[in-house]
Amino acid sequence: MEAFNPVIDQKMPVLFKAEKILDIQRVFTLKTDLGFPLILADVKEGWPMINKIKASGVKVFLSVDLPEEKKKDDKKKDDKKEATAKPKTVGEIEKEGLEKRKAEAIANYTAQASGFQKAGIPFGFSTMSAKAKDIPANLRRMIAVGLSEDAALAALTTTPAQLLGLSDRLGTIDNGKMANLVISDKPYFNEKAKVRYVFVDGVMYKLETKEAPKKTDGAKVVANGNWSYTTETPQGTGTGKLVIKDDNGNLSGTITNNMSNKETEIKNASLDGSTLTFAFDFDAGGNAMTIDVSVAIDGDTFEGTMNVASFGSFPIKGTKDPKK
């Protein structure tokens, strides 16, 4: 019970993951009843509670996980249908209303960070429930609807350090602070920006990025088979085996690594032209994370990146094992 003393003495805050508005309301009730300092984490539906959050002075981390937005092609199809459609049935009208409410909800999720900025509420970003590969695009979506680039950058760096009381060690580049840095070849929020260097505790790792090779006319790209791969991470060079199975276009398989030698099922595997993408779960000392992989296959080799949650992207290369 001694571990709770700093909380009881109001010297240490309690961090609650509160994604939905009902979660936030329940946590506020607990705070009122028990009187502990509070941090709201991974908030997704915080915009209806902006005034209460501001008045309370509660620290908040907004999620960078956003609902998938409707593709432009789908919007064009809907517009075309509306222009040529027959009188709508009751079911079609209800469906249309549902789609409209869904679009409004997505707009609210996307504009949440901008709303907190306009209200003058300091916030950091949380990546707890976001896929690493989606984070840059989601940040650009938030910026497109009103969040300033300065505020977005602060929510990734200085503000989280301040909210967690770690400004003496993190958040800015300064003597004596942890040198954990990401350097890109263009401004970070530029859609074409690529990470070139990652510093971890002052150690530099250079990331080589190459454009995916174009598929040769008439040549079929084959993903299935046994692959040996290597990857470069802050922990050093990693090696492992990737096994891809193709059942009439449905890809599945397993992956292993030299750190654990544990065979893990891959998920969401797909082959688009020469680009193979998949994900797998990894347990790093009790810290579970999802790793997203995207590689370009060129004959019996592949090359690409592994996106490791909030730790960044790391290069991966592979060679298909000869058939026995």
Image: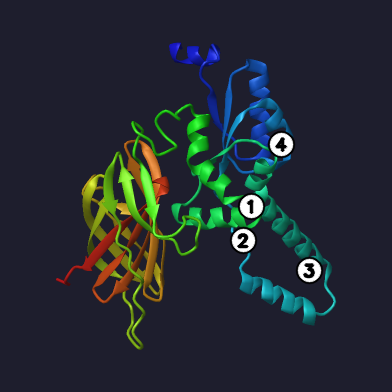
Say which amino acid is labelled 2: Glu
Q: Mark 3 to mark 1: distance in Å? A: 27 Å
Q: Residue at 53% of width from left, 22% of height from top? A: 13
- The residue wearing badge 3 is 92
Q: Mark 4 to mark 2: distance in Å? A: 24 Å
Q: Residue at 66% of width from left, 55% of height from top? A: 145
Q: Which mark is residue 49?
A: 4
Q: Mark 1 to mark 4: distance in Å? A: 16 Å
Q: Position of residue 201 (x, y in %)?
A: 30, 38
Q: Residue at 44% of width from left, 29% of height from top? A: 166
Farthest bottom residue?
A: 218
Q: Position of residue 56 (x, y in %)?
A: 68, 26
Say which amino acid is labelled 3: Glu
Q: Nearer the viewer, residue 69 or 118?
A: 118
Name the quadrant of the C terminus: bottom left
At mark 3, the secondary structure is helix
